[in-house]
Image (cartoon, rainbow, N blue to C red):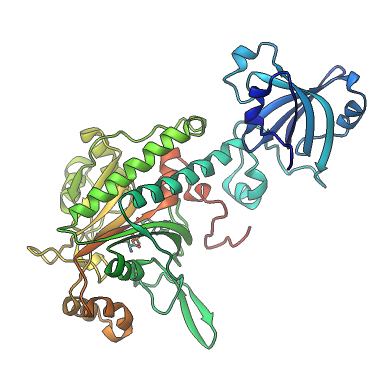
Amino acid sequence: MKGRLLIAETPRHIGETVTIAGWVSVRRDHGKLIFLDIRDRSGSVQAIVLPSAGPAYEAAQEIRSEHVVAIEGLVKERPGGAEKAGSALGGIELEISAIRTISAPAETLPFEISVPELDLNLDTLLDHRTIALRNARLQAIFRIYSTMLSAYAARMRAADFLEIKTPKLVGSATEGGANFFTVNYFDRKAYLAQSPQFYKQAGISIFERVFEVGSVFRAEPHFTTRHVNEYVGLDAELGFISDFSEVMDELEATIKYVFAEIGKERASELALYGAALPADVPIPRLRLSEAVDILRESYGKEIEGGDIDAEGERMIGEYVKEKFGSDFVFLTHYPTALRPFYTMPSADDPSVTESFDLIYRGLEIASGGQRIHDYAQLSESIRSRGMNPDDFASYLDVFRYGCPPHGGWGLGSERIVQKLLGLGSIKEAILYPRDVKRLSP
Ligand code: AMO
């Protein structure tokens, strides 16, 4: 809008008449005075209209909360502004000389949104998503999320990774299992990509280091606080590694950079959740078998089937916090049978792999490791799992013609923000989440 000043800029214009535009959060009447709290993307400010404002005063009679308005007014230091300077509304107010409704709601909103904390159950929150997101505290989640995305990309670029975008409509399931969606693709079937795994490996055979920020689809029928059917993966892959500790080093540096940037740029948003950044200490690395022993000895928890469950991850999260002061832990050397066919088995013990999960505050946020780069070994790994290498012909071509040792990770973006802010469900960290029951809004 031409001539519009953002609310955050108004303190620099004391004594001037300016035009702002935004939403009316609250209208309060005190005697003949009308107070309007106005918000835009940059902040909030109190505006006041006096009976002496004539036509503006008449117009203000019609204004209700959530009207979209343009206001012309004189920027004044607010009485008692000094102590209010730190508050959301700041140390100034606008004395209105003209006000115009740009858009008035056809109906009142289904709930009051200008409250510090919306007290709604998750379904209501998600059913009325766009309206609920007018609330400043909810918006803070996505401001932090946005900073996370830009920091991730910035750190990857600084470490010389090339950003790529890979297809999400694919001809074969990448991660195996049954959790893929099938879609009609002209006269045949296609799948929605379960990860960019094959393409990022192809990527390193060309560019050495690649990263991707992209949608990932998982047909998981569960109702948990940490699974959705569409999420955004922060993936990376790097070539010429000596071993998979280099992959963990790179991921550790990336995670630390991302949190530091969130701390720098989003202090006020973090404060709305009372959220503390993770402690900046080296991330401990434990073999999965050690974690299993710790769970048995310190928590009396027996692990069956080799992999630790969600409760076990929580307990290990507590353990490393207490013992190492770390909010993170890398669990390494997962059993070969529990990892996808492309995972590199350990040379000294092929029953385990050169792989890891990264746990943050008791929740897995990333998986990764070294991949098999030898054509014959990879073909054999596919066969050993009862699959046919011919079904992976174009993927195998990456290795048939020579490929350096490499590894990488897949990081779940929403889980990072969920744990940072202590959100009950991952769905709160997604603008429009998809689960078994929810395809709309
Ligand atoms: P994995 O399947 O473990 O590994 O996924 C990587 C990370 O993605 C996140 N994630 C999910 N987030 C929300 N909802 C889901 N249903 C969901 N499933 C997974 C988690 C998880 O740690 N190709 C490998 C990665 C690699 O080795 O590079 C992969 O996809 O945070």
Q: Specify whether 17 is left or right of 86.
A: right
Image spot of residue 286 (x, y percent): 18, 47
Q: Nearer the viewer, residue 180 or 120?
A: 180
Image spot of residue 368 (x, y percent): 28, 58
- Quarter for ligand 1? bottom left
Look at the image and tell me in which quarter the C terminus lies: bottom right
Q: Would you place residue 100 above or below residue 179 in this image?
A: above
Q: Would you place residue 159 above or below residue 81 in this image?
A: below
Asked where in the image residue 46 lies, by quadrant, the reply is: top right
Q: Residue at x 22, y 63 (%)?
A: 406
Asked where in the image residue 214 lies, by quadrant, the reply is: bottom left
Q: Residue furthest bottom?
A: 187
Q: Residue at x 53, y 88 (%)?
A: 187
Q: Residue at x 63, y 32 (%)?
A: 43
Q: Residue furthest left?
A: 348
Q: Nearer the viewer, residue 371 or 348?
A: 371
Q: Specify whether 317 is left or right of 142.
A: left
Q: Specify whether 100 is left or right of 421.
A: right
Image spot of residue 257 (x, y percent): 34, 41
